Amino acid sequence: MKAVVVHEAGGPEKLVYQEVTLPEMREGWSLVKVMGFGINHSEIFTREGKSPSVRFPRILGIECVGIVERSSDAEKLPLGQKVVSIMGGMGRAFDGSYAEYVLIPNDQIYPVHTDLPWDQLAAIPETYYTAFGSMKNLKIQASDQILVRGATSGVGVAFAKLVKAQFPDIRIYGSTRKAEKGLRLKKAGFTDFIEDRNGVLETEETFDKILELIGPETIKDSLSHIREAGIVCSTGQLGGKWFLEDFDPIMELKHNSYLTTFHSSEVSGEKLNELLAYIEGKGVAVEPEKVLTLEEVAQAHAFLQSQDSFGKFIVLDPSVVGEQTSE
């Protein structure tokens, strides 16, 4: 089969498109034909050697949508079953989805039921699951004024779409380091944008709820913009900083505010199907920003790390471009 392999840590050029051996079946694992997957910032960190547990060579890819090709559990995972898999060591502890086929433990393969086309389904797993979990943890109400820190990311755009689907008149602002992206944020559903200069928001505005996707690098500044009894959900680490130093909860969590998070490794088939039902039931537009082939993964990594990146990039099997998924 064809796959994209990282033999050593480094830049996008370390993603090598090549032929590899088809994974061999093993007890408790099943083989999935990969129909599509999204490109995630955590995979960029891993490629750069910033995931200490990962050993190279490795096929990256922490998510996929596809069809069961070979099964070791015919009752739960019959051949041809449409499935989603995210996290759980895929692309880190064992080879991931940057390939035509991926061998995955059965307990992290989730049968799903949806009529979404493959390009939309491939844009959902990690990105929309993270956005949906964060949205629920923020306990959003129609009267809230919301800020998304790192709004031009895939999760930021997905979050805005999910929130606006339930609360169409809610005021939701997005931060960006490039003012030129402001118009794109408005087109994606944001009320307006706020420029983020060197980790400082260029506004005196305050918010009821803040989705923090930059992470420890900007979280203190975000907390300074929270209103009485507001909630900050720190979900992403786009700033490349993993830990928060010199944090005084008594001083930082002023205004009787709350700090929470959402970790996308807390996955279940029930939650995934709840997300898919929400998207279909409310007509959430989940089209990706760009659709690529497996051979173009290195280009996707390079663009996501550039100043021009926006929204969600996916890789799709050429045979299903434009096709509808089937039950």
Image: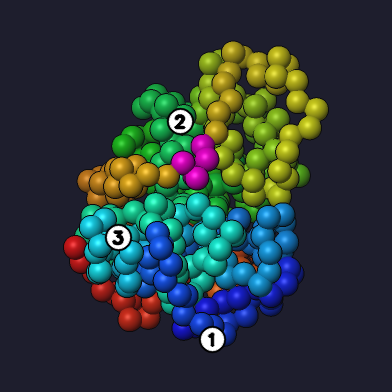
The stretch of residues the image draws in magenta is 262-266
Residue 6, given in percent of the width and then of the height, sits at 65, 73
The quadrant in which the C terminus is found is: bottom left
User: Amino acid under label 1?
Assistant: Glu
Q: Position of residue 275 (x, y in %)?
A: 33, 45
Front of the two marks 2 and 1: 1
Q: Outermost residue toward the left?
A: 327
Q: Residues within 10 Å of mark 2 (few under 14, many from 20)?
A: some
Q: Is residue 210 above or below residue 105?
A: above
Q: Residues within 10 Å of mark 3 (few under 14, many from 20)?
A: some
Q: Quadrant of residue 58?
A: bottom right
Q: Earlier in the sequence, mark 3 or mark 1?
A: 1
Mark 3: secondary structure:
loop
Residue 19: assigned label: 1
The residue nearer to you, when weighing 134 against 225, is 134
Q: CA distance from mark 2 to mark 1?
A: 43 Å
